[in-house]
Image (cartoon, rainbow, N blue to C red):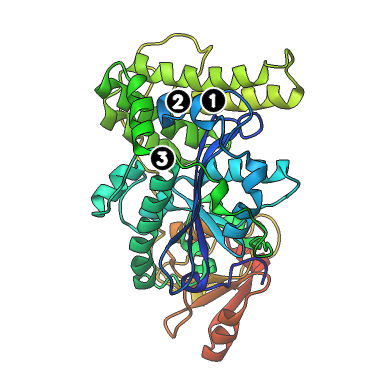
Amino acid sequence: MPGILESTIDRTPIAVVDFETTGLSAAADRVVEVAIVRIDPDKPPRTLVDTLVNPQQPVRATHVHGITDDMVVDAPNFADICGQVLEAISGCVVTAYNVYFDLRFLEAELQRQGHELQLPHFCLMRMRPILGLGGCCALRQACREHGLHHGNLHCAADDARAAADLWGVYKPHLAKQRIGTFADLAFVAANKFAESFRLQPCNSPRGGGSGPGIWKQRSTLNLIDAASATAPSPTGYEARRDYWRALKAIVSDLRIDHCEREALFRLRCELGLRDEEAKAVHADIFAEAVHAFVNDRQVSEEQENHLHLLATCLRELGWAPGDAPTPATLPRKAPPRPRAAPASPKSDPKRQPPPRDGEGAPRIDFSGRTVVCTGVLKRYPRPTITDKLEALGAKVTSSVSKKTDLLIAGENPGSKLDKARELGVEVWDEQRLLAALGEG
């Protein structure tokens, strides 16, 4: 089985990461603070990295994280702590609260030091709706809802520790819902992070990092002074800052999914931002990317493509610089979640003839059937297959039992196939399933 799919979640080391950065683009901007909290099986969370970082370029986004040029002038470069970072995440699945932002910067900084890594990961923010614990929201709100302490907002160490505490809250819910392996999580999580479960964690030799004496940790006094000095209006400033942070994280991978769009629109409504305030934040995000790319007085084809995709994302989220002025451009409320198509009338699909091979084969009514998927399916990710089956009336579960009517087996199906055969459960391969869906 490739990657970590069959690894047990409860027995797998987890690395919770958090970065503060000079800007949006992992290619052009740099990390100014890093914290990594490691959670090994049967051990309490441990903070293995916590330091400011000299980005070797001017510090921007001080209005969000409170870090100034003076604070990082004598801090270590990322090269100085690279060994510690690799050791801290060795053997781990990486996570963060909005992992797509932090992961891009982690992989980019490691690449600059000669480490080409793609890491298995999942998102703690998106785990909330997956586990039925609420919608995507800001880290501070999630901590408040679960009764957790959250220290200084946008301080990497405090954010990472709060996110690690959230993982401790999530684990009993995973067990209660019988999500034991990363394959189980991939099955129920309609999210792009599930694709990363085919990857292996990095393995770094222990003892390769510099000692913690090279760290420079910022003090609470510095954090408060730097942030308050840039806040002309505390209430309006905090709202714009929180929206800026959320928007920056969502567009960092230049892809927008429904969960991200819904979460941002909901946050904007909760913050009470006016259209002109939200547009200013969109413009700030775009201007920051432009500024990073024009420092060398030229824009490469790759940078031009980045700006085009960024503008597309901002437009999809309500408005992008250059759009024609229209009243009330940005949505006032989150769009409704799309509903699955109604199930077909109940019938007994076992009495129907098997699907015909080839394009245009008739769809089969799955009403009343309990279906389990296992292994790697090539055409669609499991969440898509689940949606298609449920739209046809199936009940899709994660484990094989006597109540299972059908097992869909992809490549490397593992023990679920053996159990299905033992119980006499009908087994289909991917080709037969696609034929049944009318897509063969």
CA gap between label 1 and label 2 equals 7 Å
Where 92 sits versus 293, above or below? below
Neighbor class of circle 2 (other Cα within 10 Å; few <14, some 14-19, many 20+) is some
Q: Residue at x 27, y 53 (%)?
A: 148
Secondary structure of the residue carrying numbered label 3: loop
Label 2 vs 3, first from the N-terminus: 2
Q: Residues within 10 Å of mark 1 (few under 14, many from 20)?
A: many
Q: Find the distance from the CA under tag 3 to the CA under tag 1.
A: 15 Å
Element carrying mark 1? loop
Q: Which residue is mark 2?
A: 62
Residue 353 or residue 144, whichever sits in front: 144
Q: Residue, x 32% and y 35% (percent of image)?
A: 266
**Residue 22 falls in image quadrant:** top right
**Which label is found at residue 22?**
none
Report whether residue 185 is seen: yes
Could you tell me if the residues under marks 1 and 2 are in contact, i.e. CB atoms within 8 Å? yes
Horizontal and vertical percent position of residue 366: 47, 67
For the residue pair 289 and 16, the one nearer the viewer reads as: 16
Residue visible at 37% across and 43% down in the picture: 337
Would you identify the image quadrant in which residue 367 lies?
Answer: bottom left
Q: Which residue is mark 3?
A: 155
Percent coordinates x, y for residue 426 in the rendering: 56, 80
Tell me the crowding category of disc 3: few under 14, some 14 to 19, or many 20 or more residues within 10 angstroms, Cα based.
many
- How many discs mark residues in the rendered view? 3
Percent coordinates x, y for residue 209 in the rendering: 64, 55
Which residue has dot 1 on it? 59
The kind of residue tagged 2 is Thr
